[in-house]
Amino acid sequence: MQQVSPIKNKDDIRAMYEVLKSHSERDYLLFSLAIHTGMKVNQLLTLTVQDLLDEDNDIKYNWINDEKDLIRVVIPLHLRSSLSSFIREEGLKRDDFVFMSIKTKKQLSRQQAYRIIHVAAEEVGLKNIGLYSLRKTFAYHAFKSGISVSIIQKYLGHQSLLETLKFIDVTTIKKETTIELNI
């Protein structure tokens, strides 16, 4: 099995958005929600409308991967708005899967989801892109935005920092840290 890579270049991510949006809103939202939350593939494919709603029936402000660690990932306003519009326009009910097959009206299979992402990546000219690229892309950009590797490791459920660095395809990290206390 070939190792997949994160999508590191933001222009490539924007190109993926465009291609996927031209295919369907569902495909665009699948990709966008995945790279903004780092959800596992099985979570993403079994996600119901109810899973996305808060107590006011609005799209949740953030995604919490694991209640015990309470690492919150903010879902951007534009994505919350797009998800809300999609749910309304598709007439989805609370217990419906968010990402359903157009033909079967059942949840997307892993194979369908892979094809959606892989075909779009090929159209953009990206190599080694698959479903795990989505979670890797989330983790890579979280790291690049300044989130510590240990927090990303905990969020992803990895056993070691080395495993996380390999996962996000980062070979070196800044080893210099300055702590200045004035107690």
Image (spheres, rainbow, N blue to C red):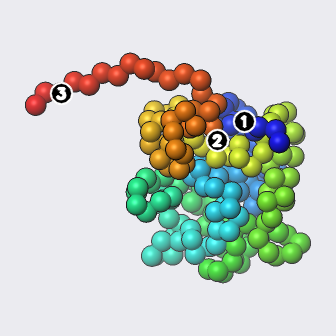
Residue type at the position of mark 2: Lys
Tell me which residue sits at (80%, 49%) in the image. 117
Q: Is residue 6 left or right of residue 114?
A: left
Q: CA distance from mark 1 to mark 2?
A: 7 Å
Q: Determine which residue is flagged by label 1.
A: 5
Q: Secondary structure at mark 2?
A: helix
- Which one is earlier in the sequence, the residue at label 3 or at label 1? 1
**For mark 3, does the 10 Å Cα neighbourhood hold few (<14), some (14 to 19), or many (20 or more) residues?**
few
Q: Residue furthest top?
A: 176
- Few, some or many C-alpha atoms within 10 Å of disc 1 (few <14, some 14-19, many ≥20)? many
Q: Residue furthest left?
A: 183
Instruction: Look at mark 3 in the image and give the residue it sits on.
Output: 181
Say whether residue 38 is visible: yes
Q: Are marks 1 and 2 in contact (CB under 8 Å)?
A: yes
Q: Quadrant of the N terminus?
A: top right
State the mark number for residue 136. 2
Q: Position of residue 56 (x, y in %)?
A: 46, 75
Q: Amino acid at mark 3?
A: Leu
Task: Find residue 79 and report its image quarter.
Answer: bottom right
What kind of element bears circle 1? loop
The amino acid beneath tag 1 is Ser
Q: Position of residue 43 (x, y in %)?
A: 64, 63
Q: Is residue 58 above or below residue 121?
A: below
